[in-house]
Image (cartoon, rainbow, N blue to C red):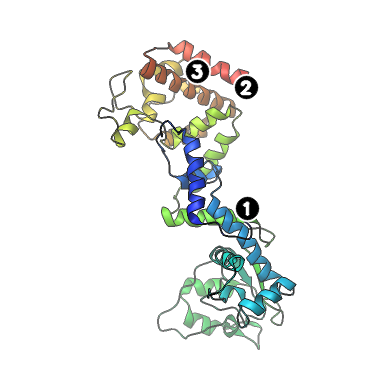
Amino acid sequence: MSCFKLPKSFCDEVNAMIAKFWWGSSSSGGKIHWKHWQKLCTPKEEGGIGFRDFHAFNLALLGKQGWRLIKNTHSLLYRVCKARYFPKCSFMESKIGTNLSLIWRSILMARDTLHEGMIWKIGDGRTIKIWEDKWLQCILGRKPNGPIVKFVRKLIDEDRSWWNESIINEAFDAETARVIKQMMLGNLNSPNRVRWNETSTGEYSVSSAYALEIRRQKAKAEGEASDAKVSKGMWRRIWKLKIPSKVRHFLWRACNEALPTRQNLQRRKILEDPRCRICEGEAETTTHILWDCLMASSVWSLSCAKLHKRPVSIEEFQRVTKSLMEVLSREELEEWAVLSWSIWNARNSFIHNGTQVCPPAIFDKGMSLLHEF
């Protein structure tokens, strides 16, 4: 995987096998995939499960070889490849022509990831292209009818060894010009250096490149949520709770609306009536069955004071979880987690087996699981 690009179809087949195993599908029949594969590959702290996407991981490994060609320009590998494939340009500018080896063609496939993650540290600025190379942390804004400037060196006043403010103000919009003029310049006689922008050391790592590729795929598909920072704190606390793994994964499914509640099944055209079978009142949403339903309320009345005194909510379960995170301690959150899991199991016993479990038994089952763990 570090030298050859695997076919996309093969990677998709492997990903599909992992997804089927996770959702419980078998040869006898498939089960509902409540969340798409990209969500499962999202890091745990961002609301996913952290599975490895084979295609993204393949590109991250290939990027390592490309990074060596960018950094180690005196190596034998670089000199051989340059003479053969890009004698008149750089590795990042080389064209995908004909009669290329499979290894070289594979390495070229990782250039988009490299271009997204690398950033230039300005030395003399003679070879850094303003509009093609990444040398600022922000997106460059061009001023309409401004002068055409190709290389960064043209933005520098060599007499003062500092930025040429007049050219910068004419070529860029106000925000871009402000960022450029605040950037410190080093030795203008030193060569330009490239850094990997995804690590603190500036050196390429496969893990950081993989995370970057996953973010790129996610941004193409759905964009980034505005409350990402708030959600990260919530997910970190969930995954660090000292409870069984099955309970943590249950909470993940509940917060992501990946439980087979009657409301969710109706949305997928599997059921017509979304009403709760226990109370025969409201629609059976995740929040209702785990928090608002008569059975759930009876269980919460046996728990700690902070839980059974919380107001009833009709919000999504993830919002309920965030609000609880703000007021509960770690021990109280662990109690809330195992009791939620126990309530869901009691609900399943009633729906599928016709067995009604009394609230004290539901409470005892959840607390015994916590104490045994």
Which residue is denoted by mark 3 in the rendering? 303
Residue 296 visible somewhere in the drawing = no
Mark 3 vs mark 2, foreground winner is 2
Which residue is denoted by mark 2 in the rendering? 373
Q: Amino acid at mark 3?
A: Ser
Q: Earlier in the sequence, mark 1 or mark 3?
A: 1
In the rendered image, the residue lying farthest to the bottom is 159
Res. 105 image quadrant: bottom right
Res. 101 image quadrant: bottom right
Q: Is residue 143 above or below residue 235?
A: below
Q: Amino acid at mark 1?
A: Ser
Q: Is residue 295 above or below residue 165?
A: above
Task: Pick whichever, 32 or 201, lies toward us.
Answer: 32
Spatial distance from mark 1 to mark 3, Cα to Cα? Answer: 42 Å
Mark 1 vs mark 3, foreground winner is 1
Which residue is denoted by mark 1 in the rendering? 207
